[in-house]
Structure formats: structure tokens, C-alpha cells
Image (cartoon, helix red, strand yellow):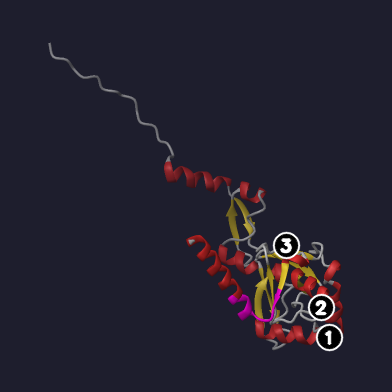
């Protein structure tokens, strides 16, 4: 007996899927808004309006709406800047900005000296006690020293040797540490050389002596 296949007689139902459903959903749920820049009417989702968006119809209107036109204080040329920079920027270029700064905000020499003294020494917020260590050598703050650096610091070994000799150590003179410990600035550990040539020859003799002792 032949077997007859069963045929489903149910009619297919019409459903909105994919792009048609999304378009149908957007058309019903869109809220009409007016662009702040071009005053054009456009549709926006309620969720975006709740987030504070939906003010502009396109990116072009958004960027132009967040910028303002301003007149340069020096050359009179109009330029575009962000609204947040409206009170900060007064000129169209760096050239005009430097002229404007020198014209209206130039400080007097007395004011500069006053501010430099105000931020030096113990009054500076980065004050660390008047000494620091660099490459093993200890530097101390002595701005009255004739051979101090631009920041007022001088090597502690040179200051101690000058105090012992009752004169300032000249820049060409070299201070040698006998035990080769750079931060040991006791006067009995310091030795003065007239120049760097004498200091180098002394180190050469020490190396030669240590080499001969090693071979012997």
C-alpha cells in the first residue's frame, strides 16, 4: 500500500522582521526635535533625549554649534574657537598672542626679582633641608659662596676645605677623598690638588703601585 505524505495546510503569517521591523519601530517611537544650529526638524529616540542628547541633527551642526566666532585683539581677524576657550583665548595665532602678552601682561624687573627671591631657599615648596646628593657627592645650599652654582649649591667637601684653609677653594683646584668614599667629607680625609693634572697623576701612581704589589 503506497504511503501518502502529509501536507501542512497552515497559512504562513505575515511578520515584520529585520530592517522593516526596525524601521517600523523607529517611525513610531521617534520624538520630533528642532536642531539648535540650523533650526531643522528631525526625529530622535527618547532614550537619547533622556541622556541629554538630541540637540543637533548632524555632526556638522554639532561641531559648529559648539564653536564661536571671535575677533582677534591685535589684528582684528575673525577666528573660530570652542565655547570653553572663549574667555581664555584672545588672539588668532601665536604671533598675535605673544604681542598681546607683552603689551598687557609684561611684568617689571622688580616684580621678577621679588618673585625669584620668594621661591628660593626655605620659602620654596620643594625645600629638602638645604642639601642633596649627586653622583655620590654631597651638595649644600650656600648662595653667598663666590663659586656656588646657579641654584646656590656647592660641594660640601670644597666648602669644608675652604673653611679649613680660611680661603675659598678655586674652581681649578681639585678635592681628593683619601678613602675614595665621596660622601666622607671629614677634613682628615680630604686632600687638595692644584689642578686636575696633579690629581690624575696621583691616581696613576696609586694604580701603578697597586699593580706592582699584586705582581710581587
- The residue under label 3 is 184
Magenta segment range?
192-201
Distance from Cα at disc 3 to Cα at disc 2: 21 Å
- The residue under label 1 is 109
As rendered, which of 207 and 115 lies closer to the eye? 207
Up the image or down, 174 lies above or below 134; here it is: below
Quadrant position of residue 80:
bottom right
Q: Main secondary structure of the magenta part?
A: helix
**Element on which disc 3 rests:** loop
As rendered, which of 200 and 119 lies closer to the eye? 200
As rendered, which of 150 and 123 lies closer to the eye? 150
Of the two numbered discs 3 and 2 in the rendering, the one whose residue sits closer to the viewer:
3
User: What residue appears at the point 74 percent right and 82 percent down from the top-left corner?
Assistant: 170
Residue farthest to the front, as pictured: 216
- The residue under label 2 is 145
Residue farthest to the left, as pictured: 1
Distance from Cα at disc 1 to Cα at disc 3: 42 Å
Quadrant position of residue 138:
bottom right
User: What residue appears at the point 73 percent right and 69 percent down from the top-left corner?
Assistant: 190
The image shows residue 33 at horizontal and vertical percentages of 63, 56
Residue farthest to the top, as pictured: 1
Of the two numbered discs 1 and 3 in the rendering, the one whose residue sits closer to the viewer:
3
Amino acid at each position: 500500500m503506497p504511503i501518502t505524505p502529509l501536507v501542512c495546510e497552515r497559512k504562513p503569517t505575515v511578520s515584520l522582521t529585520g530592517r522593516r521591523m526596525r524601521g517600523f519601530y523607529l517611525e513610531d517611537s521617534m520624538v520630533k526635535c528642532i536642531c539648535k544650529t540650523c533650526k531643522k526638524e528631525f526625529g530622535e529616540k527618547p532614550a537619547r533625549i533622556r541622556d541629554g542628547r538630541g540637540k543637533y541633527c548632524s555632526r556638522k551642526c554639532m561641531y559648529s554649534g559648539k564653536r564661536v566666532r571671535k575677533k582677534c585683539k591685535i589684528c582684528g581677524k575673525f577666528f573660530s574657537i570652542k565655547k570653553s576657550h572663549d574667555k581664555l583665548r584672545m588672539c588668532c595665532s601665536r604671533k598675535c598672542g605673544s604681542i598681546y602678552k607683552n603689551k598687557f601682561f609684561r611684568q617689571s624687573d622688580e616684580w621678577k626679582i621679588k618673585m625669584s627671591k620668594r621661591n628660593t631657599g626655605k620659602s620654596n615648596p620643594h625645600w629638602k633641608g638645604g642639601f642633596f646628593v649627586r653622583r655620590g657627592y654631597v651638595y649644600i645650599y650656600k648662595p653667598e659662596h663666590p663659586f656656588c652654582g646657579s641654584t646656590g649649591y656647592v660641594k660640601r667637601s670644597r666648602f669644608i676645605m675652604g673653611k679649613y684653609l680660611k680661603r675659598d677653594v678655586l674652581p681649578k683646584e681639585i678635592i681628593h677623598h683619601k678613602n675614595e668614599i665621596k660622601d666622607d667629607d671629614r677634613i682628615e680625609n680630604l686632600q687638595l690638588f692644584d689642578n686636575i693634572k696633579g690629581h690624575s697623576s696621583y691616581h696613576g701612581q696609586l694604580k701603578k703601585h697597586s699593580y706592582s704589589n699584586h705582581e710581587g
